[in-house]
Amino acid sequence: MNERLAAAFALLPEYLGWHVLLSASALLLGVAISLPLAIAASRSARLRWPVLAGASLIQTIPSLALLALFYPLLLALSALSKSVFGHGFSALGFLPSLLALTLYSMLPILRNSAAGILGVDAAIREAADGVGMTSRQRLFQVEMPLAAPVIMAGIRTAAVWTIGAATLSTPVGQTSLGNYIFAGLQTENWVYVLFGCAASAVLALIADQLLGLLELAARKRRRTPALLGAAGLAIGVVLAVLPLATFGKPASYVVGAKNFSEQYILAELIADRLQAAGAAVTRKEDLGSAVAYRALAAGELDVYVDYSGTLWTNVLNRKDNPGRAEVLRQLTAELKKRDGVTVLGSLGFENAYAFVMRPDRAQALGVTSLADLAREAPKLTFGSDLEFLSRPEWKAVDAAYGLGFKARKSYQPTFMYRALAGGEADVISAFSSDGRIAADRLVVLTDPKAAIPPYDAVVLISPKRAGDKRLIEALTPLIGKVPVEAMRAANYSVDRDEQKASPAQAARTLEAALKP
């Protein structure tokens, strides 16, 4: 417990700094866009409905989906900019998060601002007109000051929403307090989960109270609360963001990882190798499969580990299965030719999708293969990870065997295994290098039709790092040196219920177990 808490505190300056910078930037941009729109809406009934309805519509989109939708859009715009002007921009991380959170912050500011301006007593407007004020003078000298408490209430609501939603920016590559939550849920590190939730809640409360001083100042027409609130916000942002200053630091390699334990461990293994070679390293974790590869091809990531079957089906859109060695050979050639991505080589083990069942359930039903499973599927519930049911691999397996399950449910990988153990799922799409298969004595169903492609774990290097001698020399010794037994042991050390290791500890243990 103490070690995990110490590790959480060690990460706090970076995570909090990025979270504050992202939230403050999105809120300021939201205010800058929303206030002029609210003024325009208050002046025109024809404009009022579409503006408020549009903001409401954005609010109905789940914040995680809104964050994810901006990434492919920005990636396309970056590619267009590069082709036209010779320069692109980063489509991963801060920019998509900023744009999505800005849109998400606008509704309460728009509604409150428009309502506050429209709520000014008509008699006061007439008096302002009577003394000869112009429309502009009436707005800024009468209506806005009177509406200021209502406007500030909307900004307070927007601040709390934005700080909370910013935790969901982790899957698009933006560091935030959400890193604690996503990694903690996957590895069942509840200290991280609670720490991330608590830090986000405390940050939201502090921001709300400081903005509350500005609201009080607007209501009471007092200067002191306004000065205290503004000073507190400014000092807080500066102190939080200060640790992010990178002046004088060497250029970093960006190591990517998807959202499960093995990926965290391999990212740490790669980072350790690069740091031992004298390089500075940053990590982008909890990425989706499509996001990770696109980010690498676009130069947003420098290196990460992916799987040959994922690349074969999702990136190259291949449906055939010419065998493990041939898949790897063709994959290496095609990714280099098409995207400039270097497949440095296989680490030496496979992490294939594997359909598994509890031994008692498999024995009772007489199921040993996917063909047997098809016979019993209408009576069973299938549990998968969050993306498997939308992947080509599932479509290929379903087409080959006709797996008409009674119900299908998606889980984070850790909870998928919990569902199997608790009986909420009868069969799950596990991973062949997962140590929990052996530890829980799960039955791996055979695939007689070879519908599932091979899944060698391969090191991918971005086009911009293809000739990077230090990177290649640091990682080449890993190629072909990671036994599947060692990977299973490392995975299980992170996933087991008791005496859990951190991904960094598991990576050091894995390093020691590499083949000579």
Image: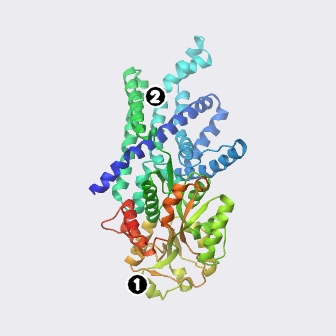
Foreground of the two, 332 or 16: 332
Helix, strand or loop under label 1: helix
Q: Residues within 10 Å of mark 2 (few under 14, many from 20)?
A: many
Foreground of the two, 469 or 458: 469
Say above or below: 11 vs 132. Answer: below
Quadrant for residue 357, please give it: bottom left
Say above or below: 202 vs 44. Answer: below
Helix, strand or loop under label 2: helix
Which label was assigned to residue 1? none
Say above or below: 247 vs 444. Answer: above
Q: Position of residue 449 (x, y in %)?
A: 61, 83
Q: Which residue is mark 1?
A: 360
Q: How is the image coloured?
A: rainbow
Alpha carbon distance from label 1 to label 2: 64 Å
Q: Is residue 80 left or right of residue 130?
A: right
Task: Name the residue at the right extreme.
Answer: 84
Q: Position of residue 259 (x, y in %)?
A: 48, 61
Kind of residue at badge 1: Asp
Q: Which residue is mark 2?
A: 149
